Image (cartoon, rainbow, N blue to C red):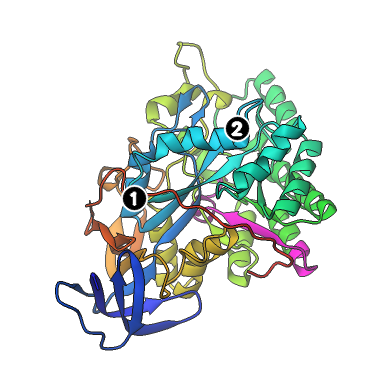
Amino acid sequence: MDLLIKNGTLVTAKSTFKADLAVKNGKITAIGTNLKPEKGTEVVDARGKLVLPGAIDGHTHLAMPFGGTISSDDYFTGTRSAACGGTTTVFDFVLQGQGELMQDAFKRRDKLAAPDAAVDYAFHIGVCDVTEDRLLDSMEDVVKEGVTSFKVFMVYDFGVDDGSFYKVLQKAAKIGGLVGVHAENRDVNNVLVAQYLKEGKTDAWWHYMAKNEKIEGEADVRAINLARMAGTSLYIVHLACKQGVDAVTKARDEGYPIFAETCPQYLNFTNEVYKRERARDYVCSPPMKGKESQDAIWEAIKRGDIATIATDHCPFTRAEKDWGIKTKDGKKGNFTTIPNGCAGIENMYPYILSEANKGRISFNRAVELCATNPSKLFGLDDQKGALEVGLDADIVLYDRKKNVTIRNKDLHGATDHTIWEGAKIKGYPVATYSRGKLVYKDGQFVGEKGYGKLVRCKTLKFKNPQL
């Protein structure tokens, strides 16, 4: 026995109970009352604390090229920040290049991550090109490498058309993969962008207007219909609008394996942020929507129609956000020249747990959304996502009485601002263990660069909406 956490209150997706928890060689080896330490065991008294599984952030963009720059958090600063917020596994995206086999894209990206990651990491493949059979077949090859989830973009220049999307869904159904989708109507978005710019409408509000509720909602409905046609599951990432929520609920009620993710920014902010002085700092895609959509998302969380919480973490510096006013080459900017994305990897678990601490949802539901369900969806439930004997000792100690006001200066990422500045958080993680190793304690990162390891995922075939 290497570590014994005593006297804590353990919280799982299904139950809450007082118990001790023992760890050896990075695994949970025992859970029970009055467990006795062995010689040399480190004993941690968790009296008055909640003991939680580490969160799994299923949606991050670390060191990602976008909008003429690269997101400011690399694999070290991003995973360091994750650890300090109680997240012990991050999923990042491997963006396939034109003509590139997916297993080659995966190996290319893993070489970048392996030396730097401070907590464990896994990958989704961002699909760009399935125009040839060998490219489509490379989905099966990369699944053998333990990368079993894929993402298609219905927007951006590297997005796919509906035919390619459908082919990816068909292939995933055969090989036990899960397809995620960034759902927005690219063609209508492009028309609106051109119209607004022609009319001289250039500030951040028009980013929202060009990607409004209907732009996202129509694509959500279309994506669900494509998955139903292909007879397979679908994972809608960063769901942010009521129309999409309603479509997910309807499909799930009809028995289809449709799963949805949302993000803390959509739960805490509305489109009113695009009227603020520094509205450009909040530019992300999809943008925050109106209060009706926010309310619908919270209700879907409560009734179980939203399966996971993730961040879509993709930070840029304020100087880069300022390209919305003047671009890096000195030209006049507009809402299309603002790099899309916000930081959130360190704030996700504290925010959701704070909402649980305030009584909005249960702590069990918070654990389910942030740890247990992601592990099931992405094929990690035999390794992570719960406090169970035999699983990795990814553990968070949480103090319900510790109140924190978020300040960027106290965070551990590599950007110079946060949209969460000044947010009041009720309760906070005070320690994070990654495979039994202490990586965060009382506001300080105590882990090490390169400690994190690649986690390989198993294949899954979802037949119904139950996890």
| Label 1, residues with CA under 10 Å away: few <14, some 14-19, many ≥20 | few
Q: In which image quadrant can residue 101 be found? A: top right
| Residue drawn where x is 38% and y is 60% of the image | 350
> Which element is circle 2 on?
loop
| Residue drawn where x is 32% and y is 64% of the image | 26
Q: Nearer the viewer, residue 392 or 238?
A: 392
Q: With 265 as the anchor, is 84 left or right in this view?
A: left
Look at the image and tell me in which quarter the C terminus lies.
Answer: bottom right
Q: Nearer the viewer, residue 233 or 416?
A: 233
> Which element is circle 1 on?
loop
Residue picked out by circle 2: 96
Which amino acid, mark 2? Gln
In the rendered view, tell whether residue 228 sits above or below residue 214: below
Look at the image and tell me in which quarter the N terminus lies.
Answer: bottom left
The percent coordinates of residue 95 (x first, y second) are 57, 34
Which amino acid, mark 1? Gly
Q: Nearer the viewer, residue 148 or 285?
A: 148
The percent coordinates of residue 264 (x first, y second) are 49, 54
* Identity of the residue furthest to the left in this view: 40
Residue picked out by circle 1: 422
Q: CA distance from mark 1 to mark 2?
A: 38 Å
In the rendered view, tell whether residue 321 sits above or below residue 454: above
**Mark sitting earlier along the chain (1/2):** 2
In the rendered view, tell whether residue 344 sits above or below residue 323: below
The percent coordinates of residue 23 (x first, y second) are 30, 71
Which range is magenta? 250-271
Q: Nearer the viewer, residue 274 or 228?
A: 228
| Residue drawn where x is 57% and y is 48% of the image | 147
Does residue 160 show up?
no
Q: With 249 as the anchor, is 75 left or right in this view?
A: left
